[in-house]
Image (cartoon, rainbow, N blue to C red):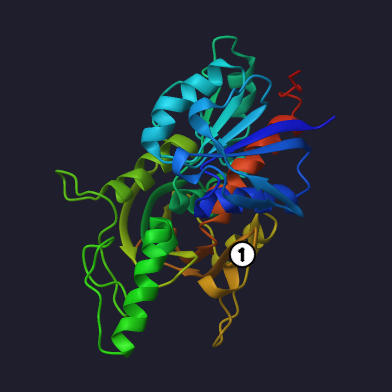
Amino acid sequence: MGYRVAVVGATGNVGREVLNILAERKFSADEVVALASSRSVGREVSWGDKILKVKNLEDYDFTGIDFAIMSAGGTTSKEWAPRIAAKGAVVIDNSSYWRYHSDVPLVVPEVNAHVLDAFMANPRRTNIIANPNCSTAQLVLALKPLHDAATIRRVVVSTYQSVSGAGKEGMDELWGQTKGIFVNDRPAPAKFSKQIAFNVIPHIDAFMEDGYTKEEWKVLAETKKILDPKIKVTCTAVRVPVFVGHSEAVNIEFANPISPDEARDILREAPGISVIDKREPGGYATPVEAVGEYDTFVSRIREDVTVENGLAMWVVSDNLRKGAALNTIQIAETLIERGLMERRAA
């Protein structure tokens, strides 16, 4: 007997990727239900070799559902996650709404799967588990084994984030502007604040009073919650004209000495990481190579000579996968593997 899984937001970029990965990884599911808003009811989505007709979230009965994977935005998650969780399903949410609640674990399984043990043992648990921001997920994956080895004090990260992080509208805008420029018919920006084609925009999400954007704040807050609250983090988040795949330039200051060779060896043994680091043209990962891959790629590992015990590196990942869909499914798999999730009767 397999599990019953509901995918909320099944018609979006991440929702479709969730369905793809459920099939790719042969997740133990007897039934997968595709859910979305009323305007998407009846549309068809794929789960492996099966075609699912999208059902209406508003009137779906979640009784007997084991996992609800939500990728429908913060407003929907705020309203629906507690209602679904109250039916007994474990909700794994991709939005930012639940990430900072003290009673909701924020999980990257390779980094902090242990928090799920105490959470599931609590009879008064919320039944909601949060997935981190796409940029945070790949960052902490690379930081965790290095933190264990030499204790990280400070991280400076600049992100180069693809337009798929802004959803289908972001991808459409890049495509439309790129085509338009070639025929001298440049569409005005709509999803983004400035032209994204052939440009970079140092602005993702709303500005805050301290000058950081909400996207940058997410990386700061989430890294501390997942990895270690003592780590100092600063971030500059930049949108770049890439369809899929986020990249990060990362500078790390450690409490203890660690050489680039030691870091390279440690990361090669770390789960979910592939090291591609040849000091020659093309000897590094770019978003193009990361698309469709499960692993996060680390390249350009070298000494940061501006601080004592410093390293610099380049981190690349498919943001629709490890940054979103893959990580949610890995959370569900981890609950099963650790014996924390029993199948429920319908």
The residue under label 1 is 264
Q: Nearer the viewer, residue 217 or 276?
A: 217
Q: Is 29 situated left or right of 6 in this image?
A: right
Q: Secondary structure at mark 1?
A: helix
Q: Label 1: how many residues lie within 10 Å, few (<14), some (14-19) or many (20+)? A: many
> Total of numbered circles in the picture?
1
Farthest residue in the left direction?
Answer: 209
Placement of 290 over or under 68, stated as above or below: below
- The residue depicted at 21 percent of the width and 68 percent of the height is 194
Visible residue check, residue 117: yes
Image location of residue 8, percent across then percent down? 54, 38
Farthest residue in the front direction?
Answer: 42
Q: Nearer the viewer, residue 313 or 119?
A: 119
Placement of 195 over or under 32, stated as above or below: below
- The residue depicted at 58 percent of the width and 20 percent of the height is 119
- The residue depicted at 48 percent of the width and 66 percent of the height is 313
Task: State which quarter of the image contains the N terminus.
Answer: top right
- The residue depicted at 53 percent of the width and 42 percent of the height is 41
Visible residue check, residue 104: no
Residue type, numbered disc 1: Arg
Farthest residue in the right direction?
Answer: 1
Image location of residue 224, percent across then percent down? 41, 38
Image location of residue 3, percent across then percent down? 75, 31
Q: Nearer the viewer, residue 271 or 229?
A: 271
Quarter where residue 197 is shown: bottom left
Quarter where residue 331 is shown: top right
Q: Is 346 situated left or right of 165 in this image?
A: right
Image location of residue 161, percent across then percent down? 40, 63
Task: State which quarter of the image contains the C terminus.
Answer: top right
